[in-house]
Amino acid sequence: MVSVAPMRLFRWWLFFLLLLLPLGMLVEGLLTNDLGADPAKYIVKELGFWALCWLWLTLAVTPLRKFFGWRWLMAYRRMFGLYAFFYAVLHLLAFATFLLGWRWDMLMTELTKRPYIVMGSLALLLLLPLAVTSTQKMQRRLGRRWKKLHLLIYPASLLVLFHFVWQIRSDFFQQLIFAILLAILLGYRLYLKRRS
Amino acid sequence: MVKRYKSGGSQPVLPSEITPESVYRDRRRFMQAALSVAALPVVGLPSLTEAAGYDIPADLPRYKGPDWLQPKLAEAGRNAELSTRETLAPYYNVITHNNFYEFGTDKRDPVRNAQEFKTDPWMVEISGEVAKPGNYHLEDILAPHALEDRVYRLRCVEAWSMVIPWLGFPLADLIKRFEPTSKAKYVQFTTLLDKEQMPGQRGFFSTIKWPYVEGLRMDEAMHPLTLMAVGLYGNALPPQNGAPLRLVVPWKYGFKSIKSIVRIHFSETMPATSWNMTAPDEYGFYANVNPEVDHPRWSQATERRLPSSLLTPNIIDTLPFNGYADQVAHLYKGMDLTQWF
């Protein structure tokens, strides 16, 4: 244990800081007034984008572990998932604060009139119990049910994809890439299941 | 008459404090301009100092435009009657934040990707149901028209808005010169098609068919508010804002105000328009600003007026016809605007 600790510690900090970097850059941009003419929209979009990336990263852990035999990666899955949740919460808070100014009437309109916002909110709602039960203590306490509960990440990721796709105006390059990635990540699981 | 100029966020500054001294010293130019202002058939008092004294920070680029445009820009006077007195969007916002998909789909793409865009010399084709069709140099198209400085609200279909001081002339004056026939019921405009210069036109993943096209009904095109713009903020149009010639129809969503126009075509039938072809259930031919008719994916009842501060977003109610209902609502009398959105 002692001998592997430095490597582990190094990796842990590496991932911790790497996933924090986009937020750091946003804060830096905010402080130096370098987020463009509409910083509100920019912050909301960036936070959403990175929440999406970290969620996909979380989903990539199992396939990467099995395909490349990277067993060590497993130790960081919780961190990735919590980062996805963290960015998603910030994304929602930024949306409600910077774009809506917490106007409840508008919040209601957005929730009923913008289908992609319904999708996004639902996804966050599904991720909430996963974040809450992410501790080892909860994992032990829930036992087999923990795994079942955490299957919620699959419908959540689909909702997130819809949330993203539904905002296409004209160019769909990014959405296509993330759809393909998700198809691979989920398809790989189906493939494994069918094989066993 | 020197008036204080409001600019978003910053404190009011006297125009004389921020305009380069040379402009004020240039007495000859001032006299010329003053004379031309006196000759303009404009009600109200177009204030030259007001038009010249725009608050443009020294570290931001000014767009001069071709030499032949200089006297026209210098002689432009404010059309106070058709201008809103609302606070202007800062120059920075106007030149760095807009949609011009030919240069990328992000709001910051146009300013990044359009700086090398060649806008002079520029040809415009006039075609269709007109007595004088042909290919014209932009210089010749502009020759007889005096420029006016007009401050309009611009409401994007994405529910943000800005107040922008344009330099241009009424489209109606241009149309009359080319003598449309009695069959001319609509005008269609086309943006330049140039994959070399416009990276957005090279993408595989765009659902817009290039070139971008837009259109107006003849009475909309002839309306005195409808502007052909060649400048903004007292200078030539920046390439990212649709240089060298763009349309500005202030009571319609921004996408109607087509940029970098190379063709003006008169027809008897309603022309195709780009966003309508891309998503007909979301974008109509008319695209009049209407808080009552939502975009299928979002509400149009309010808008975020830029600049918008982070903690207190500048959310305002969207007005029918973007606040120009008194002037234009009669054009759509008897039409069901939920059907003709």
Image: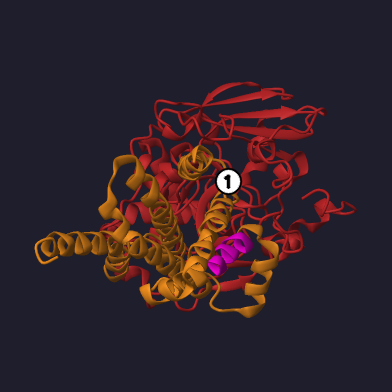
Chain colours: A orange, B red
Q: Residue at x 45, y 71 (%)?
A: A131
Lateral position of residue A166 relative to residue B137, left or right: right
**Can you identify the residue that label 1 sits on?**
A169
Instruction: Identify the residue at the far right of this view.
Output: B334
Q: Position of residue B321 (x, y in %)?
A: 71, 59
Disc count in the image?
1
As drawn, the residue found furthest toward the top would be B134
Specify the subunit that label 1 lies on: A
SS of the residue at dot 1?
loop
Give whichever of B30, B339 is nearer the camera: B339
Furthest residue to the left?
A3
Task: Indicate left or right for B272 with B92 as reference.
Answer: right
Majority secondary structure in the magenta region: helix
Picture residue at 31% right of the left edge, 51% below the top? B61
Residue B124, percent from left and from top:
54, 27
The quarter of the displayed image where residue B233 is located = bottom left
Q: Residue at x 28, y 62 (%)?
A: A25
Relative vertical location of residue B295 with respect to residue A174 in this rendering, above or below: below
User: Vertical placement of B251 versus B215: above or below?
Assistant: below
For residue B309, say whether it is visible: no
For the record, the magenta segment spans A117-126
- Which quadrant would residue B59 be assigned to in this image? bottom left
Residue A43: image location, x then y, percent: 41, 64
B327 displayed left or right of A60:
right
Q: Which residue does the image show at 28% across and 71% down from the upper left?
A: A31
Q: Nearer the viewer, residue B149 or B277?
A: B277
- Identified by mark 1, the residue type is Arg
**Residue A124 part of the magenta segment:** yes
Question: Is B40 situated left or right of B22 in this image?
Answer: right
